[in-house]
Amino acid sequence: MCIQADADSYKAFLDELFAAGLLIASGVRGVYGRGGAFEHVVDSFGRYVTQQGRHLAPEVMHFPPLLNRADYSRINHIHNFPDLMGSVHAFTGGERDHAAMLRKFEDKEDWTRDLAASDVMLIPAACYPLYPTATGRLPEAGRTVDLLAYVFRHEPSDDPARMQIFRQREYVRLGTSEQALTHRDAWLARGKEMLESVGLPVEAVVANDPFFGRGGRLAKATQREQVLKYELVVPICSTEKPTAIASCNYHLDYFGTAFDIETADGAPAHTACIGFGLERIALALFKTHGLAVAAWPQPVREILALD
Ligand code: ZN
């Protein structure tokens, strides 16, 4: 059992997960393979999310974990989270460049500087690839979109819940400020109920994102003052530093303005999303109910339709 927020408790739980075959080590901190029982839980929770969102009749739009680099340049992620970003680079040279790179590779020198930026960045959130596709006028009723993607955050860690690449399932609302806020607040309540129903004692807290550097202090203060983002947190390895397993975000007209998305009245659209962190939810379930799914409480197994 791990109660303290110390490195040992993270490492101990991680080692238990490896030993049980739930996660598979890759040699890189925060990058793991997933075993069958782990995926079964992720799939089951995903089905539960689908069932709970069915009344919204969402459009399903699942993107690869990549964002057009030109679209990345229209948002301020590089200002706020430069340390978390991921960029895809590729070899674009000719034969002479190839020979030079190979020499470095074989001499164990740094050959990666011979690569050039490709057209894509890795996405930091599942909803980012949606907004550039939504440019233009929204219908009166707005839009609700169901998204699922692996997202990337460069933060190597021994905390099993702090992965570098993991899945987010989202419901995004695009529309008026009222439509967006209603969505955010309804999902804050519904998300909390869903997680409680599977035995996770979550609490809703105002988020404290790790904005970068001195400039980030203002962004951090604004996020808190305007109460734009809530997180649903639960202790996994630490009761002092509980882990956010879902977040409910209101972006004001930030994406509407950046990508020229308009309401039916021609005003910049407002957007909101709920994101479920599927790996973190699975880890919280394993930590709370034990590593053997067959021994989980019957009500939890029934809600998740675990056979
Ligand atoms: Zn989102």
Image (cartoon, helix red, strand yellow):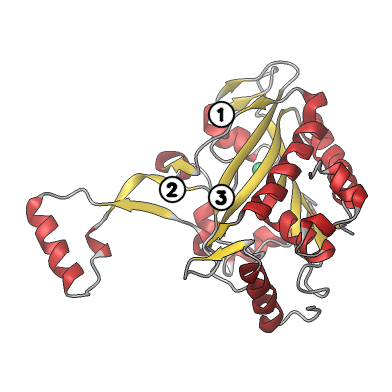
Q: Residue at the location (70% across, 73% down)?
A: 13
Q: Residue at the location (13% across, 56% down)?
A: 98
Residue under label 3 = 151
Mark 2 vs mark 3: give the one in front.
3
Instruction: Please tell me whether mark 1 sits on a helix, a strand or a loop.
Output: loop
Contact (Cβ within 8 Å) of mark 2 with mark 3: no
Q: Which badge, 2 or 1, comes first in the chain's sequence? A: 2
Residue 183, horizontal then vertical, whole percent: 80, 35
* Quadrant housing the N terminus: bottom right
Amino acid marked by disc 2: Met
Q: Which corner quadrant of the image does residue 38 belong to?
A: bottom right
Where ligand 1 lies, by image quadrant? top right
Q: Residue at the location (63% across, 71% down)?
A: 19
Mark 2 vs mark 1: give the one in front.
2
Mark 1 vs mark 3: give the one in front.
3
Residue under label 2 = 121
Mark 1 closeness class: few <14, some 14–19, many ≥20 residues within 10 Å: many
Q: Which corner quadrant of the image does residue 37 belong to?
A: bottom right
Relative to 82, residue 71 above or below: above
Amino acid marked by disc 1: Asp
- Disc number for residue 260: 1
Q: Nearer the viewer, residue 20 or 79?
A: 20
* Quadrant housing the C terminus: top right
Contact (Cβ within 8 Å) of mark 1 with mark 3: no
Residue 169 seen by the camera: yes
Relative to 274, residue 25 above or below: below
Residue 207 seen by the camera: no
Amino acid marked by disc 3: Val
Relative to 31, residue 87 above or below: above
Residue 254, horizontal then vertical, whole percent: 63, 40
Residue 107, horizontal then vertical, whole percent: 17, 75
